[in-house]
């Protein structure tokens, strides 16, 4: 739903791992931002209403002949450019500076001396901790550039050519490890690019609802509603735009979190806040039957995905032909699928995989395609969705099946649902700022002997995990307060049947069988 009238800062991706993070930080400043590959046509780039351009980092060396590059004419457009890490080296190399292998690699938090007269560093301290990650460095700036930041090991930590509006930083302002990094990007988009800051979720929702009305007209829309944040906000936006022309199908595959079906039905079903056609399909037993005896996680995924399509197909045929199929695709889905930038494809995304093969429709509508997850949540709030739904943690499509190690049974699902609900209740007692980003329970396949009263038990161990993340792609383990751990463990052992042991997962990487999102 984005238009060329919206002011934009464009991120040009040279293979950097933080491409999405740069765009998110710019949007947090109130400025719309998109990501394109360095191979994108310059003519198409010029068609956009550009206020500024940011080059990402990347793993290559700018001085090697086969490294990613871009036509130097981009520096003559008069549009401000900020190069980050590899992007800074590329700019210097192209414009006559000297880039070479650094005598000493810098990695991690580094104290950087800043020239606070620079528009990039206005209002910042003269010394600032920044996140460095580079093997090469700029040994000599290009003609016309002035050095505005340095470290003992990096003579050019930042440089600028104010006349041509060209800026570069060797460090990463987009990551949380850089103090005042968002302020640096804000200084760029406002002090250098002259942005007005018109990217707001209230206006986005209003404009998108109007655009959906105009596009759909009196057509009919079918939406697969999973109950997750993305599909729920998508459905709410369409409900506001077209009301009864929308039919949402919610499939309960029996692998949801505790009370999730009831919560979704309360919002979207009869008596809820939206006047739409809502179909809830109880398919629990057929999924359990298909999964009987299956232990391998990837096989579980395939079975659940295929069965979901079959269930949805049956319901779609009852509805008949529709004009549009709605999907809750969001911007990271686009970027991670390799369509929005240059970084390696992380995973293939298709929110309703395979559905177009059997649903009779004219076109797909994806009203959230331009949004990051935090923007989707804010849109949900603007649409009046309840906070418990908007703030819901990411949840794997196959549900609890891949948070159960070994075979899946209704009994095991109930165990995980109860333990997970207790764990989340205890963590939610912490102040908002102290809660991890994601926390959930998983059922191990380990059983051990225990004592309950005067009797012997032989029951399962439950694993609890908590991580902190900003992008839901990378994460760090969260060490919860001992009181929270103790309360959760005691309640789970005492209240959940067939559990006699609680394990806290403090590994730095999630096990393959416990899906992160």
Image (spheres, helix red, strand yellow):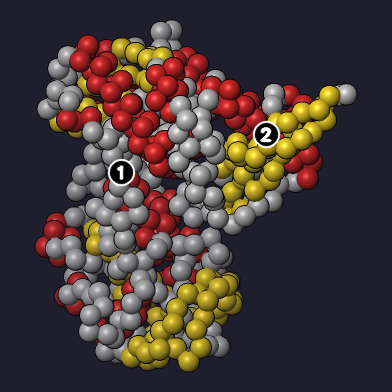
Residue indicated by mark 1: 349
Say whether residue 509 is left or right of residue 453: left
Q: Is residue 178 above or below residue 241?
A: below
User: What is the distance, in whole Å, between disc 1 and disc 2 at their CAs?
Assistant: 34 Å
Residue 138 % position (x, y): 39, 86
At horizontal 29% and vertical 86% (from top left) the residue drawn is 63
Residue 445 occupies which quadrant of the picture?
top right
Q: Nearer the viewer, residue 355 or 275?
A: 355
Q: Is residue 64 above or below residue 257?
A: below
Mark 2 crowd level (few <14, some 14–19, many ≥20, 10 Å Cα): many
Say whether residue 381 is left or right of residue 53: right
The N terminus lies in which quarter of the figure?
A: top left
First in residue order: circle 1 vs circle 2: 1
Q: Nearer the viewer, residue 389 or 204?
A: 389
Residue 210 % position (x, y): 24, 28
Residue indicated by mark 2: 460
Mark 2 secondary-structure assignment: strand
Mark 1 secondary-structure assignment: loop
Residue 178 % position (x, y): 54, 66
Q: Are marks 1 and 2 in contact (CB under 8 Å)?
A: no
At horizontal 37% and vertical 90% (from top left) the residue drawn is 100
Say whether residue 245 is left or right of residue 101: left
At horizontal 21% and vertical 13% (from top left) the residue drawn is 319
State whether residue 428 appears in this view: no
State whether residue 225 appears in this view: yes
Q: Is residue 200 above or below residue 322?
A: below
Residue 515 % position (x, y): 49, 43
Farthest-out residue, right: 454
Residue 277 occupies which quadrant of the picture?
top left
């Amino acid at each position: 739903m984005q238009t060329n009238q919206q002011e934009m800062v464009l991120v040009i991706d040279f293979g950097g791992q933080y491409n999405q993070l740069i765009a998110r930080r710019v949007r947090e400043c109130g400025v719309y931002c998109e990501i394109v590959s360095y191979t994108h046509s310059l003519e198409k780039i010029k068609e956009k209403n550009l206020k500024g351009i940011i080059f990402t980092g990347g793993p290559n060396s700018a001085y090697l002949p086969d490294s990613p590059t871009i036509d130097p004419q981009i520096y003559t457009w008069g549009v401000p450019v900020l190069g980050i890490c590899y992007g800074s080296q590329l700019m210097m190399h192209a414009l006559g500076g000297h880039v070479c292998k650094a005598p000493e690699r810098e990695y991690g938090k580094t104290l950087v001396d800043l020239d606070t007269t620079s528009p990039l560093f206005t209002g910042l301290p003269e010394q600032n901790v920044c996140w460095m990650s580079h093997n090469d460095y700029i040994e000599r700036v290009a003609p016309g550039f002035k050095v505005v930041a340095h470290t003992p090991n990096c003579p050019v930590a930042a440089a600028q050519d104010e006349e041509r509006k060209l800026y570069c930083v060797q460090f990463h302002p987009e990551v949380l490890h850089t103090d005042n990094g968002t302020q640096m990007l804000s200084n760029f988009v406002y002090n250098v690019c002259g942005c007005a800051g018109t990217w707001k979720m209230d206006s986005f929702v209003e404009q998108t609802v109007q655009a959906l009305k105009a596009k759909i007209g009196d057509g009919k829309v079918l939406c697969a509603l999973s109950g997750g944040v993305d599909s729920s906000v998508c459905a709410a936006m369409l409900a506001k735009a077209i009301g009864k022309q929308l039919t949402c199908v919610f499939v309960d595959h029996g692998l949801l979190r505790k009370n999730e079906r009831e919560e979704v039905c309360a919002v979207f079903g009869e008596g809820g806040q939206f006047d739409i056609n809502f179909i809830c399909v109880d398919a629990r037993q057929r999924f359990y039957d298909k999964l009987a005896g299956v232990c391998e996680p990837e096989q579980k995924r395939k079975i659940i995905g295929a069965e979901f399509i079959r269930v949805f197909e049956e319901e779609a045929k009852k509805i008949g032909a529709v004009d549009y199929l709605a999907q809750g695709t969001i911007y990271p889905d686009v970027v991670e699928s390799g369509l929005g930038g240059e970084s390696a494809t992380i995973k293939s995304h298709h929110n309703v995989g395979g559905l177009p093969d059997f649903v009779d429709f004219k076109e797909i509508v994806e009203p959230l395609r331009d949004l990051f997850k935090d923007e989707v949540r804010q849109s949900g709030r603007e649409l009046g969705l309840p906070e418990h739904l908007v703030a819901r943690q990411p949840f794997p499509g196959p549900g609890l099946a891949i948070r159960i190690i070994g075979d899946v049974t209704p009994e095991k699902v109930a165990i995980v649902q109860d333990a997970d609900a207790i764990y989340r209740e205890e963590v939610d007692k912490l102040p908002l700022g102290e809660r991890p980003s994601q926390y959930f329970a998983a059922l191990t396949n380990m059983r051990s002997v225990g004592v309950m009263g005067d009797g012997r038990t032989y029951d399962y161990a439950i694993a609890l995990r908590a991580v902190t993340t900003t992008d839901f792609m990378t994460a760090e383990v969260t060490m919860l307060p001992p009181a929270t751990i103790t309360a959760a463990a005691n309640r789970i052992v005492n209240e959940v049947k067939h559990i006699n042991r609680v394990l806290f997962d403090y590994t730095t990487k999630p096990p393959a069988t416990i899906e992160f999102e």
